[in-house]
Image (tube, grey):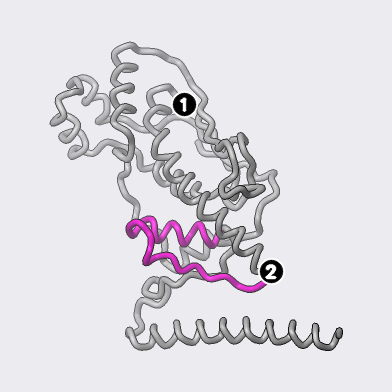
Amino acid sequence: MIVVQSERIRYDTNVINTMRKGEFAMRAQNLTLLTDLYELTMMQGYYENPSDQIVVFDAFYRKNPCGGAYAVCAGLEQVIEYVRDLHFSPDDIDYLRSLHIFNDDFLEYLRGFHFTGDIYAIPEGTVVFPREPLLKVVAPIMEAQLVETAILNMINHQSLIATKASRVVYAAKGDGIMEFGLRRAQGPDAGIYGARAAMIGGCIGVFIAWKIIPSLPMHILIYLVCVVLLWTSYSILSARAKDLKAKADAK
């Protein structure tokens, strides 16, 4: 069960639906082995020493990034997709067996593994503060152990970008901010999810043209991007001219 608590002040954004309609969502992937090896060796230790213990893990951060006053939570949708698809494929089992550190009984247990715990979280786009739980995992100890690394990876990455985007949007004082970070992102997933997080933080759009208008020829895409850039430049210069005129009139 995954519960998103809604009784919080948060940014007004429909970004998730927007990204889906723009076909930005990455295809579902089996990210079960997106974890540290020691998480799996600890799971084997728990398996060999059975316990019905239910544990509670809270995901939080200790201080605001960049010396800011707040952060913006993001990445929850990817956590939900990850947990729902959590399973060990035959290839995963074969790889783990090739490491020669896992017992056959434990590997057979992993074949039927799935997450049975509960996850509680605040909505994406919520303004959050240090040492405040962004997400809570309540699960049997082996299951909670496995999901720790992946959850931190997803929440940390997108929350950092959403927070930075929010600060830039605030500094722009009403001017629209476009996300343009795909070319410098660390791979396709980071580019797509980084753009998503930037929109959660308040950006009005992204420059991932092939996903927005996949059927248009390249020269038309380039033309459209140039139009957007020219319009943005015109808006900025017009606003600056109005400010200068107002100051001159005031004198």
**Alpha carbon separation for disc pair 1 and 2:** 44 Å
Q: Is residue 150 left or right of residue 9?
A: left
Q: Is residue 139 magenta?
A: no
Query: Residue 191, percent across and down?
Result: 39, 60
> Residue 217 versus residue 61: which sits nearer the camera?
61
The quarter of the picture where residue 141 lies is: top left
Query: Residue sitting at 63 percent across and 49 percent down?
Result: 68
The amino acid type of the residue labelled 2 equals Lys
Do residues under tags 1 and 2 come within 8 Å of each other at their CB atoms? no
Query: Residue 60, percent across and down?
Result: 55, 36
The quarter of the picture where residue 98 lies is: top left
What residue span does the magenta drawing correspond to? 173-200
> Residue 22 versus residue 127: which sits nearer the camera?
127
Query: Residue 171, percent across and down?
Result: 65, 64
Helix, strand or loop under label 1: strand
The amino acid type of the residue labelled 1 equals Ala
Answer few, some or many: residues within 10 Å of disc 1's Cα (few below 14, many 20 plus, some between 14 and 19): some
Query: Residue sitting at 39 percent across and 39 percent down?
Result: 150
> Residue 216 versus residue 174: which sits nearer the camera?
174
Q: Is residue 11 left or right of residue 159?
A: right
Q: Is residue 179 above or below residue 220?
A: above
Q: Which residue of the protein is positioned furthest toward the front in this rendering?
A: 251
Q: Is residue 178 magenta?
A: yes
Q: Is residue 141 left or right of residue 101?
A: right
Question: According to the image, label 2 marks what residue?
Answer: 173
Q: Nearer the viewer, mark 1 or mark 2?
A: 2
Query: Residue sitting at 19 percent across and 20 percent down?
Result: 103
- Look at the image and tell me in which quarter the C terminus lies: bottom right
Query: Residue 217, percent across and down?
Result: 33, 85
Question: According to the image, label 1 marks what residue?
Answer: 139
Helix, strand or loop under label 2: loop
Q: How many marks on residues? A: 2
